Image (cartoon, grey):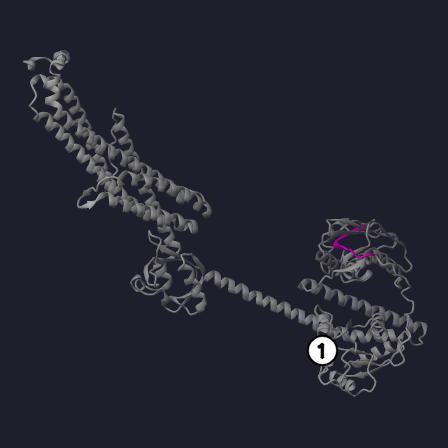
Amino acid sequence: MFSSLSIQTRFLIAPVIAVLLTLLLYISSNNIIRENAVIFQNISETSLVQISEINEITLLITASHSEIISLLLESERPDEEDIYVEGKIRLNHLYQIEERLNESINDKDELTIDGVNIFSQIQVAFTAYSNQIISAIEISSADIKQAPNELVLANEKLKTVNDLFLLLSKYYATQLSQQSDVIEDNLYKKNYITELTISLLLLMLLSAFYFAKNTSVRLNQVYNALTKLSVGDTDIKIYKNKDAYIQNIWKAVAEFKESIEKSEIYKNDLLMQKYAFDQHAIIATTDLKGTITSANAKFCEISGYSLDELIGSNHRMLNSGHHKKAFWKNMYQRVSKGKVWSNEVLNKAKNGRLYWVATTIIPIKSVTGKITGYMAIRTDISMQKYQHKKLVDANLVAESAVLAKSQFLAAMSHEIRTPMNGVIGMLSLMLDDKLTHEQAQRVDVALSSSKSLLHLINDILDFSKIEAGKLEIESIDFDLKTMMEELVQFMHFQLKDKQIKLLIDCSDMPESMVVGDPSRIRQILTNIIGNAIKFTHEGRIKVCGKLISLNKKKWQFQCEITDTGIGIPEDKVVNLFDAFSQVDISNTRKYGGSGLGLAISSQLAKLMNGDISVSSFEGKGSCFTCTIEVEKSFKSLVIASNNIDKDASSEMEIPQWPSNIRLLLVEDNRVNQLVAQGLLKRFGLTAEVAVNGVEALALLKNCEQPFSAILMDCQMPEMDGYEATRRIRENKYNEFDKAVPIIAMTANAMKGDREKCIISGMSDYLTKPINPELLLEKLKHWIIK
């Protein structure tokens, strides 16, 4: 009778009838309610909850994967150490996802789909994906170029995980659909209750049925969308739903779709990068035994082998035999420990052609971290090696040329100094004879010209030494202030009849003792002051010295030489310090000079961390400023009298020689013998003569009275001075006085000649032409010591 009532009426009388039939409803519908409650609970706990959980985990994996891809591919010039640190952070996210996944499925019973335990398969696939991500980050932190290849592998393993999630989602969606059908069947099959009970419950059941059916339709739409995505088809429609729960599922599907689209983009990018990489690099992979498993076209092109010939062959087929076993042993030991090895390798092509490659070998690891093979990445550097060899050969040629030049200068120095020693020595000895005024004047002019020629030779040798980088700077303690004062006093003798005042001012020098090269500093100042005297006819020349503290260990010595001479034209100043440069070519004829003095002085100053600058006004004068670095000395200044202040023409002080003095002169050149004997005669001494080392050893062996000193030439026939000295010092058969002083008198004046004499055993060293004062000083030192 209630069937004719409208739905509205049924809703109105339902409360009254419900009171009357409460007991009946409870008894009769208890089973139905219980069954449907269980069904709803199963739907809630299984299908919908699991689908939601799957989607949330999928979103977390997608987000984590996108962050890792961005880290390895999208960063601009990533730092490999930063990749490693950031990678560790991303891995922590991945570990958290893995823990959530394990919590979701570990407590569940086994679920078999298509004959496989789907939960176990998901765990295995996710573990493989995690291991691949770990490998990608570790390898990329060592070599970022490997990131694309590793991410391609990671994408494939992620696809496997997504496929399994889709299969599980499909299963739960099917279960949800089937359970909805069961509810429908139960609702329509239960005719046990009266029409009134059905009427009362109809509205609720219809509502539940509508909700279940509507939910099933929406989930079927989700299922269809996921099915398409599982095969890589992203052409799906994303529905909008008022139900927040369903809408969240569609949101997850949309994000999943976006991640797949991005993965495809990244995959295409990786393929393009691999293509570009293949165009440049020579790439091959091998197994653990070195058998080639893959090779790119570039490898085939440079080696001359086809791909079929390479695959399955051992990599030793390219061995050129150039490298030793230790080279390859080092390579194997490194890569077998999982490390990257890089070096330059000479390989041999199929036709026997040799080619150089810059090689990097990278271990290939499985998901468990086990090394399964190796990847070799090479770049052809044959042209670079060829250019390097040409450069080395050119350098050898240049070094040979420098050596030949040095040897030529040494030979010329010796050959020129030998006759110059004779010329200057003989002219000097002639001045000791009784000559007319005119004869003495002529000899004096000849001696002055000879000394000028010797000065030019010394300048050329100094310039050549500087140019070849063979000039050494000494570092000794000396009194800088006294050296300057003595130099200026000595330069007074060059003023002659000029109306010039030569002044010195050292008031700005707080210390006298410094550490440096006094002879080279004196050479620089002598040259600049000498030029000032040469080009100044009246007025004055002032020398001002300063010491400026640079730090606790160093001074800057600054010396200004100001004159009132002829000055220098502005356009000539720029070339003033060039070799063989003169302000005016006519100056060479008028004033003399080679144009090397200032060039040498400038180079010497630079060797001592200084420089020389000039300011000049034509017709008014010039100011040369020389700066040189010297070290601070911790030695006390010793004030002692000296003879440098004496007139340059004053006679040398001849000492009282011992009565038993006996000298041996070892010299093959007759002129040099006469010069040396003449100088010794001036000193009140005589010497016995040997023309070579053999005669010298014979005299020493058979002499009854030992020699007081030996004056030894270095280059002689039969036996030179070096060998003779070594034999004297060895005294193998106790035939000689091995302690006898030996003073070298040689025309060898190049760098290393003094050291060569000392190393051979000589006591001292003099260069030709022999300076009488220096010779006397050496004899006094070694005989009256």
Q: Is residue 569 magenta?
A: no
Please state, as top left, top right, bottom left or bottom right, where the C terminus lies in the image: bottom right
Q: Position of residue 171 (x, y in %)?
A: 19, 38
State left or right for residue 237 relative to residue 695. left
Q: Position of residue 678 (x, y in %)?
A: 86, 78
Q: How many marks?
A: 1
Please state, as top left, top right, bottom left or bottom right, where the N terminus lies in the image: top left
Please say whether residue 369 is visible from this viewpoint. Answer: yes
- Say which quarter of the image contains residue 34: top left
Amino acid type, label 1:
Tyr
Q: Is residue 67 above or below residue 568?
A: above
Residue that numbered label 1 is attached to: 722
Q: Residue furthest left?
A: 1
- Say which quarter of the image contains residue 669: bottom right
Q: Residue furthest bottom?
A: 702
Q: Position of residue 568 (x, y in %)?
A: 78, 52
State left or right for residue 261 relative to residue 730. left
State left or right for residue 20 relative to residue 491. left
Q: Is residue 627 magenta?
A: yes
Q: Is residue 765 above or below residue 598?
A: below
Q: Nearer the viewer, residue 180 or 652?
A: 180
Tell me the magenta residue range. 622-636
Magenta stretch: dominant SS?
A: strand
Q: Nearer the viewer, residue 287 or 77?
A: 287
- Say which quarter of the image contains residue 410: bottom right
Q: Is residue 113 above or below residue 506?
A: above
Q: Nearer the viewer, residue 755 or 362?
A: 362
Please say whether residue 349 is visible from this viewpoint. Answer: no
